[in-house]
Image: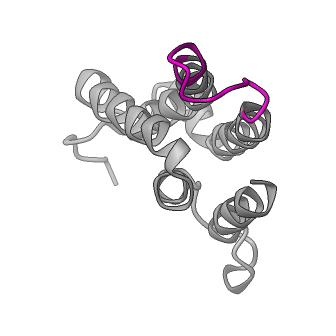
Amino acid sequence: AWIWLAIMVGAVLGNVLNPWLKFKGGKGVATSIGALMGVFPALAIPGMGIFVVWVVSLAIWRYISVASILASATLPILTLLTFAVAFKTNRIASIDPMWPFLIVTSVLSTLVIFKHKANIARLRAGSEPKVGKRVAA
């Protein structure tokens, strides 16, 4: 599991710290969701869950950054719940296989939230643009 999880984290780090863009890349949100759903079937359920959180948050507050931060913060929680349900329904014999997934999803969540520090500052200042509103030049 660790090797595949490392590959998944490598894809996200490649997006966030792109050497061809002077280590200034994306924020890793879409890459994280794609990696979660594509690399490990066990993480497809939390991946779909954070996508739902993202869509609902965007519909309510109309800030992409808020939706991304909330979805990222939800990821470790949904991972924990997925493994807890699998254990409770006897689909897995032990909760021990959860730890690598919980650690990696927590690291990815922290990285994505950290990459949104400029957005958080704009949200606090009230200058973060909403979806569908024109930004003054």
Q: Confirm whether residue 128 shows in the render.
A: no
Front one among 118 and 58: 58
Q: Residue 54 at x, y = what percent?
A: 37, 34
Q: Image quadrant of residue 110?
A: top right
Q: Is 80 placed above or below 128 here? A: above
On the rendered image, what quadrant is the C terminus found in?
Answer: bottom left
Which residue is painted at 31% across and 47% down in the image? 136
Q: Residue at x 72, y 56 (%)?
A: 5
- Above/below status of 95 relative to 132: above
Above or below 119: residue 16:
below
Residue at 67%, 47% in the rendered image? 115
Q: Which residues are magenta?
A: 85-97
* Residue at the spot 31% in from the left edge and 23% down from the top edge: 61
Q: Height in image: 6 above or below 133? A: below
Q: Tell me where residue 106 appears, x and y as whole percent.
A: 72, 34
Residue at the far top in the pictured view: 88
The quadrant where residue 7 appears: bottom right
Rendered image coloring scheme: one colour
Which residue, as the protein is rendered here, is positioned at the far bottom? 20
Give percent across and percent down for residue 26. Answer: 57, 62
Number of disc labels? 0
On screen, residue 111 versus residue 132, left or right, reads right
State the image coordinates of residue 35 (x, y, percent, origin top left). Answer: 54, 59
Instruction: Report if residue 94 lies within the magenta region.
Output: yes
Q: Which part of the image, by quadrant, shows the N terminus?
A: bottom right
Secondary structure mostly seen in magenta is loop
Asked if residue 86 lies in the magenta stretch, the reply is yes
The answer to whether any part of residue 13 appears in the image is yes
